[in-house]
Structure formats: structure tokens, C-alpha cells
Image: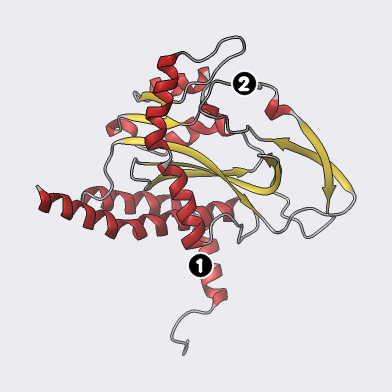
Amino acid sequence: MDDNCPDHSVISRFRTEMTKRKVYDKLLKEINKQLVKHGILVKQGILLDASVVDTLRKPKGKTEYEVVIDREEESQEEQEPQPQQENRSKLVKKEKSGVDKEARWVKKRGRLHYGYKQHTATNEEGLVLALITTPANESDTKHVEDVLDKIDTENYKSIKADKGYKSENNDKVVKEKKLRNHILHKAKKNKKLTRREIEFNKLISKTRYKVERTFGTIKKQFGGGVARYIGLEKMHTQHLMQAIAYNLYRSPGIIVSCCEKQTVK
């Protein structure tokens, strides 16, 4: 009681209690409401992407189990899709103990990762609107609706995402949310992209990249990309705390930018 500030165990217990009560999702939403009120978070379009977060508590040893191969990023040129890619797997070694058992293996761009995946929606400035956390082997395509359900999409105009999110079900979800569908077009077997679809992809990509900038800044400034905790719930807390920190970190710069534009006018 005589200490000037709580020690690490007090902070840890407080964070655990906040996690159990699912407070961090509400906290991100409340902070975003205040950013909207002050004109910092502008409701334009929604950008959607996912990022893999590695944990150091990965398997080693002799036990074998399945690894899912994640979708590969395609170039802007037309390519034939590989529909069976996500279902392919290989066997790797697993450690008997000391492993984060809720994390999973995924192979992305030829590299193996063991950990979690952060599915994130931002506005067109890259400010985080909402996110969900899954094991790393969960497909990005399956969680579009889960992320959008956390956002009041009524005042947003569109959704932008890379071609890995293109599917009939996601097109249906976007339509139900009354958003313009700006998910990049993907070539199909024996059917190349039209010139118009290629130009559409190039135009959308000029804005869509900003969600990747968000991931990069969180990784650089707030230690993102590496799991600090064990278990799905606590990792979701980590992602939310980093999202809150990122939004507050970006806010002063957005205010200054808006003031400069008003001065010029």
C-alpha cells in the first residue's frame, strides 16, 4: 500500500479481470466514439485485412500434427486461383509441454508460423474500428461477417479488401450490410480478369494498403507481431490494447493535418 504505483502482479490481475469481463472491446468502441465526436475518426470506407502473430511457445519434439497452408497473396496480374490451397497440410514436430496449446500452425508465403491471427477492420485513415482474434490456421475469408458485426456500418460507404476475401458468401454479407463491394476481383479457372476488373483492382489498391501500414506501425511502435501472453482470450486483449494505443498515437497527427488543411482553405 505504500508503493507509489501497483507492481506487475496487481496490473496482471487487473488485466486478467478486464479480459474475463470482455471490457477491452467496449473500451475500444468507447474511445472510437470520442474520436468520431471530435472529428478525428471519419466514417468513410472500411479496410479489412489479417495479420499473423507468432508465439515463442511453439512446438518442438517428436509428436506430429497438421499444419494448414494459408492463402498466398496473388499479384495484381490475373492468376488462376488455387481452391484447394487452404486444405493442404503437412506434418511437423510438436513439443510435449510448455506450448501454447490454443495457438496453431500456418504456412504463409513459404514460411511456417505458430501463433494467432488478428482480423482487423480500419477506416480509410488506418484507425482500428474493430478486430477479432483466432488461431493462425483460421481462414481470413470466413471471418468477414464476424468483424463487420462489431461495427455500426450504417454510416460507412464501402469495404475494401484483397482478392483473398472474394467469395459469394462475402459478397452476400457486404450487400446485407449495405456497403459498396470494393473487394478486389479474383481470376477464376479458365476465366481471366477483364481490363475493367484489372483497373478496378489498381484503383482500390491505392487505398487498401493503409491497413497494412497500421499493422506495420503497431509492430514497430507497440511490439506487435509477437505474442506476449498465452491463450486466445489474452491474445485478443493484447491486440485490442495495441489497437487502442495505435488510435491514440495517430490522433494528434490527424488533428494537425486537419488544421493545416483548414488553414490552407
Q: Quadrant of residue 229?
A: bottom right
Q: Of discs 1 and 2, which sits in the foreground?
A: 2
Q: In this view, does 202 lie to the left or right of 251?
A: right
In terms of depth relative to the viewer, which is nearer, 203 or 38?
Answer: 203
Q: Is residue 256 above or below residue 140?
A: below
According to the image, what is the colour scheme of the structure?
secondary structure
Q: In this view, does 59 lie above or below 183?
A: below
Instruction: Give the number of the disc on residue 49.
Output: none
The mark nearer the N terminus, 1 or 2, is 1
Q: Residue under circle 2?
A: 81
Q: Answer whether residue 240 is visible to the viewer in this image.
A: no
Residue located 69% across and 27% down the image: 85
Q: Quadrant of residue 57?
A: bottom right
Residue located 49% across and 54% down the image: 21
In terms of depth relative to the viewer, which is nearer, 191 or 154?
Answer: 191
Amino acid type for the residue under numbered disc 1: Phe
Residue located 30% across and 56% down the image: 251
Crowding at mark 1 (Cα within 10 Å: few <14, some 14-19, many 20+): few
Q: What SS does tag 1 mark?
A: helix
Where in the figure is residue 14, as x and y percent of width and height? Answer: 51, 67
Q: Residue under circle 1?
A: 14
> Gap in Å between the C-alphas at discs 1 and 2?
47 Å
Crowding at mark 2 (Cα within 10 Å: few <14, some 14-19, many 20+): some
Residue located 39% across and 52% down the image: 28
Where in the figure is residue 89, as x and y percent of width and height? Answer: 77, 33
Q: What SS does tag 2 mark?
A: loop
Residue lying at the far right in this picture: please name it: 62
In terms of depth relative to the viewer, which is nearer, 56 or 151?
Answer: 56
Q: Is residue 190 left or right of residue 48?
A: right
Amino acid type for the residue under numbered disc 2: Pro
